Amino acid sequence: MNFDVLAGLRYSRLESKVDLNITGTLPVWVASRSVHVSQNFVDPIVGFKGKFNLGKKWYAPYHFDIGGFGLDSDITTQAAGGIHYSIRDWVSVGIDYRYLHYDFGDEGMLLKELTISGPELAIGIHF
């Protein structure tokens, strides 16, 4: 087993683009247009990560962090865990589940909240 405390920054960029192309006989004020909005977020984070050894070649990595603290986003949380197999000392494969949530607040943001979660296939190269 190992356990590491972490601190750092998370950078995210959100983009939204809408194209409106209208054909036919419509009023002049209903014209084709394109709207593109983007926002960048840099949030401080603190958390921990590590792994539980499950046997000679199997282990379960985990990760948790929390951040934002009212700077670019009100709060952001991330959690992940999975199971991995070491093929060699320097390479592993595994499957993880990751959850990432942002609460951006109400003040003129592109989104109020965003949650992304799901499984991921992991290939690790260890130095």
Image (cartoon, helix red, strand yellow):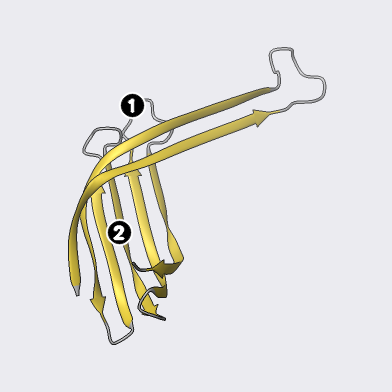
Q: Secondary structure beneath disc 1?
A: loop
- Give whichever of 103, 90 is nearer the camera: 90
Q: Determine whether 46 is above or below 90 in the image.
A: above
How far across and down, in percent of the image, does residue 83 sit? 36, 75
- Residue at left offset 77%, top offset 19%: 26
Amino acid tagged 1: Glu
Q: Quadrant of residue 111?
A: top left
Q: Name the foreground residue: 62 vs 17.
A: 62
Q: Which residue is more in the foreground, 125 or 36?
A: 125
Q: In which quarter of the image is the C terminus?
A: bottom left
Residue 107's tag is: 1
Q: Can residue 65 be seen in this view?
A: yes
- Please determine whether, in this image, residue 59 is positioned above or below residue 65: below
| Mark in the foreground, 2 or 1 | 2
**Mark 2, residue position:** 79
- Image location of residue 113, percent across then percent down: 37, 41
Residue 67 appears anywhere in the view: no
Which residue type carries mark 2? Ala
For disc 2, the neighbor class at 10 Å (few under 14, some 14 to 19, many from 20) is some
SS at mark 2 in the image: strand
Q: Nearer the viewer, residue 122 or 67?
A: 122
Q: In this view, does 37 lie to the left or right of 99?
A: right
Report the disc number at residue 91. none
Q: Where is residue 47 in the image (x, y as percent from the top left)?
A: 20, 54
Give whichever of discs 2 and 1 has the lower sequence position: 2
Label 2, label 1: how far apart the Cα atoms are: 26 Å
Residue 82, percent across and down?
35, 71
Could you tell me which quadrant the N terminus lies in? bottom left
Dot 1, how many residues are within 10 Å of its Cα: few (below 14), some (14-19), or many (20+)? Answer: few
**Number of callouts in the render?**
2
